[in-house]
Amino acid sequence: MRGTSLISLFSLSRHHILHSQCRFFNSSASEPSSNKLFIGGLSWSVDEKSLKDAFSSFGDVTEVRIVYDKDSGRARGFGFVIFTNEDDAKSAKDAMDGKALLGRPLRINFALEKARGGPVVVPRFSDNGRFNSH
């Protein structure tokens, strides 16, 4: 079937796509960390101290890390806040998600633990636009 559109590819069943048409490089899925929060939407002017100050009212913050670009040294707009316990992290997430910090709304989720090399799902297409069977 030449010219198969992407829309028609999505009409394939999820089971068919995930189990018979994709190559799984690492089958161990990352699990959300229950006391580590991903904080997105950070203002360029936020530093570790101001981020810790914003979250420490919810409990004991053990670590705060803002991610910086290794070439420019400029903040990349996201970071992590780690609490001593899950309940404090959940309270902070519920209270602060969508709230503004230094003029920018925060996007907060429980952080996924980084797994080296995976999980990666790569769909394989043949020349005619259909999924391969291996």
Image (cartoon, helix red, strand yellow):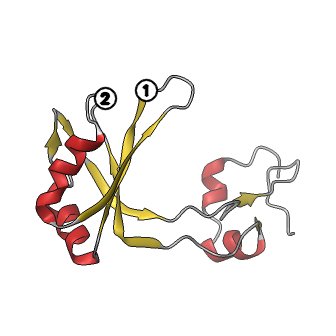
Please state which of residues 95 and 121 is positioned toward the viewer in this rendering: 95
**Crowding at mark 2 (Cα within 10 Å: few <14, some 14-19, many 20+):** few
Q: Is residue 38 left or right of residue 15?
A: left
For the point 81% across and 54% down, the residue is: 125
Q: Nearer the viewer, residue 132 or 8?
A: 132
Image-based side of 116 in relation to 63, left or right: right
Alpha carbon separation for disc pair 2 and 1: 8 Å
Q: Which residue is mark 2?
A: 44
Mark 2 or mark 1: whose residue is earlier in sequence: 2
Q: Residue furthest left?
A: 57
Q: Tally the numbered discs.
A: 2
* Tag 1: amino acid: Arg
Point out residue 56 in the picture as x, y percentages from the top left corner: 16, 58
Q: Secondary structure at mark 2?
A: loop
Picture quarter with the C terminus: bottom right
Q: Position of residue 42 (x, y in %)?
A: 29, 38
**Could you say which quadrant of the image residue 10 lies in?**
bottom right
Figure check: 79 above or below 16? above
Circles 2 and 1 in contact, beta carbons < 8 Å: yes
Relative to 131, residue 87 above or below: below
Q: Residue at x 22, y 50 (%)?
A: 52
Q: Secondary structure at mark 1?
A: loop
Q: Residue at x 20, y 71 (%)?
A: 88
Q: Of the numbered discs in the image, which one, if any, rests on residue 74?
A: 1
Q: Residues within 10 Å of mark 1 (few under 14, many from 20)?
A: few
Give the amino acid type for the residue marked by disc 2 in the picture: Trp
Q: Quadrant of residue 38?
A: bottom left
Q: Position of residue 130 (x, y in %)?
A: 80, 56
Q: Quadrant of residue 48?
A: top left
Question: Viewed as shown, does residue 58 lie left or right of 75?
Answer: left
Judging depth in this view, the residue of 3 and 16 nearest the camera is: 16
